[in-house]
Image (cartoon, grey):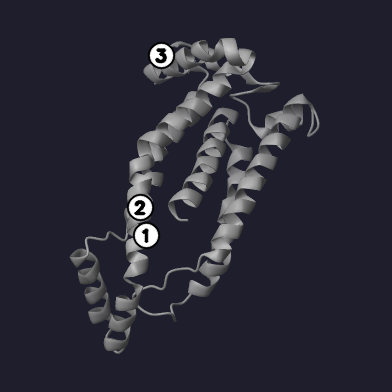
Amino acid sequence: MSAFAGLVEHLADLLQPLFGAAAAAAAIILFTALVRLLVHPLSRAAARGQKARTALQPRIAELRKKHARNPERLQRAVLELHAEEKVSPLSGLLPSLCQLPAFFLLYHLFSSSSIGGASNELLSHELFAAPLGDRWTDALTGGGMFGEAGLVYLGLFAVVAAVASFNFVRAKRTPLPQPAAGPDVPGLGTVAKVMPFLSFFTLVTVAVVPLAAALYVITSTTWSAVERAFLYR
């Protein structure tokens, strides 16, 4: 944790001439971008996997007709087809899973009052008037929704809402892939209806985590939206 705190402090020192008091916030955004660059090859592989799975849909449809009365045989046949074509059904999860350690590091770093027995000086940094270690509830109790810190959060919520709306439109245009067991899977219709709204849950995350972690979430979500628009065009 001390090494990670030192990395954030070093990045903030480098960015201080450009961003002044918001240098630590800029460092977090830069750190997030670096993480996403490292994960980008996995995102490209996930996009290729998604396109490959889409290309297999006609053959899966044939298997579904062939083994309509034998769901277990259908499942085995679909798995064999994926193995034959070297397509992993789970490849799309890897980019998100690889980012979790970075998010939890930031969350823990800006939730701890001390690091290695010393006071956590990162908590004194701010994004404009909002301390990076505070949450939205702190802004509300401090100056209210339209106080200086509250306005920072309103700006962040606007960014999240814009990105979520962009993802919502794209999700509505993208049909949910049919599972191997066939279209009549209990709950699939509900999942298809709820899926486009999942992006808006980022608003809840931003509201309840420390501002530093919220910046990570917002930057990563925005990156994902742009990346997916490019990779899945």
Tell me, for residue 46, which label it has, or none.
Answer: 2
Q: Secondary structure at mark 2?
A: helix
**Residue 80 placement: quadrant:** bottom left
Tell me, for residue 116, which label it has, or none.
Answer: 3
Q: Does 36 appear above or below 187?
A: above
User: From where the camera sits, is residue 38 visible?
Assistant: yes
Query: Pointers 1 and 3 in contact (CB under 8 A)?
Result: no
Q: Residue at x 35, y 52 (%)?
A: 46
Q: Does 141 appear above or below 172?
A: above
Q: Nearer the viewer, mark 1 or mark 3?
A: 1
Q: Nearer the viewer, residue 85 or 215?
A: 85
Q: Residue at x 57, y 52 (%)?
A: 199
Report which residue position mark 1 lands on.
50
Q: Amino acid at mark 1?
A: Gln
Query: Pointers 2 and 1 in contact (CB under 8 A)?
Result: yes
Give residue 183's position: percent from left, percent from top.
43, 79
Q: Residue at x 33, y 45 (%)?
A: 42
Mark 3 to mark 2 CA distance (whole Å): 38 Å
Q: Nearer the viewer, mark 3 or mark 2?
A: 2
Q: Residue at x 53, y 47 (%)?
A: 225
Mark 2 to mark 1 CA distance (whole Å): 6 Å
Mark 1 to mark 3 CA distance (whole Å): 44 Å
Q: Which is more N-terminal, label 3 or label 1?
A: 1
Give residue 202's position: percent from left, percent from top.
58, 46
Q: Secondary structure at mark 1?
A: helix
